[in-house]
Image: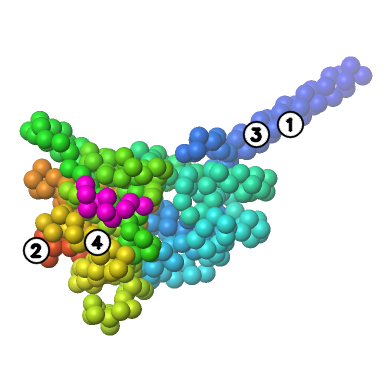
Amino acid sequence: MNTLLNRMKLTFLRSGVRVLVLLLTTASVWAGEIQRITDLAGREVSLPAKVNRIILGESRYIPALAILDEQPISKIVGMLADFKQTDPGSYRQYRSKFPEIDGIPQIGHTSADSFSVEQVLTLNADVAIFGLEGHGPTARHAHVIRQLERAGVAIVFVDFRRDPLTNTPKSMTLLGKVMGREQQAAEFNTFYQAQLQRVYDGLAQRKQQHADSSPSVFIHSRVGLQDLCCETMVKGMMASFANSVEANNVAQAIVPGAAGVMNMEYLLTIQPDVYIATAIGSTDTWRAADLNPAVDNIPPYIVLGAGVSEDVARLSFQNALSAANSRGVRQLRAVKEGKAFAIWHHFYNTPMNVVAVQAFAKWLYPETFSSLDPQATMAELFERFQPVPLEGTYWISLDTQATETTSFARHARVGVKQGAMQ
């Protein structure tokens, strides 16, 4: 009897050990399936270690995802329509490479108000990627966050807009963790920081050689969109680019908030040293048949970006400054002296912003940065980190004699990301 009892105890003990081992193993597996990260809103977020289904609060984040993954479309199950509607040239490039992009469900148009929580809840997403600020839901949309998290959708906030030069590397690191592409994120950040450091080194050198004050600049935002002149950026976005190169943004002293409108009469009084316009136009708003400046129905937008030729870019710039709502700009001394430039508006919300910083530096300090080549930086960025070719014009001077113009024609090879490791 004792022998039988001992055997039963031993069997029970062994069974208990097996159960305990099984429980510990299962717990270990569960723990391995979850990763915990801190996003750009300072929130601790738990999400699957392997993310397979992604919602984009702004579809313009697709090029950022493409820096990390040569198949950036494959995991997106829903997105706002802002990429297609606000940057149709770039969208067409991605559609040519990834036709399936047209089949991704649109969960809204170009605003947070249009974002459909109900539709998102049908898509079985693992994670939603939102921006601290922008067109889609932000950290201020508590009701959206609450509903999605209750349904098991993790929410991660990134930022290329509010504090772009500080938060771009942080956001890429975060996206690398979300997508399981940490090595690729680290490689891009190395490239990014090196290109930014070239600007900082030039500024330090200038300080040693010059005691004069910083040049003043006026950033004329979204030229042609408003009936009144002149919309501008004061904090974040492209204002950060001006601050990073130690320029005096003339709007900062008088315009409250992140953006606002400056009076043309005031601009004519203070006369900024450099004029920089941002271009929201595309080939969709500017047709080849409409190149005659005498045509009254030409949209007053500056056209830059993918698929835009240098001729169209410059003509659109000239015409935009001839439109009724911007005509006074031509009286600025900077414009008359050939210090007027236009830049692709969407640099303000992308990891490619480092190229815009280099362009700003070259425009504001042409002697200091005579050897800096933003064109080469842009070409390298596309060749190493983008799956689509670099074709188009992304910045331009108003003066046809100036050299600060760039037009790319297949500088990057499709599908080649030399530095990206899988």
Is residue 236 visible in this depiction of the protein? no
Q: CA distance from mark 3 to mark 2?
A: 68 Å
Vertical arrangement, residue 7 with respect to residue 149, above or below: above
Q: Residue at x 73, y 31 (%)?
A: 19
Q: Reading the chain from its start, which is encountered first: label 3 or label 2? A: 3
Q: SS for tag 3?
A: helix
Residue furthest right in the image: 1
Q: Is residue 63 left or right of residue 400?
A: right
Look at the image and name its color scheme. Answer: rainbow
Mark 4 or 2: in front is 4
The mark found on residue 401 in the picture is 2
Camera-side residue of 337 and 102: 337
Residues packed near mark 1 inside 10 Å, few (<14), some (14 to 19) or many (20 plus)? few
Q: CA distance from mark 1 to mark 4?
A: 81 Å
Q: Amino acid at mark 3?
A: Ala
Residues packed near mark 3 inside 10 Å, few (<14), some (14 to 19) or many (20 plus)? few
The mark found on residue 399 in the picture is none
The mark found on residue 27 in the picture is 3
Q: Find the magenta span and give its range.
A: 261-270
Residue 279, position as x, y percentages in the image: 31, 61
Residue 83, position as x, y percentages in the image: 43, 62
Q: Amino acid at mark 4?
A: Gly
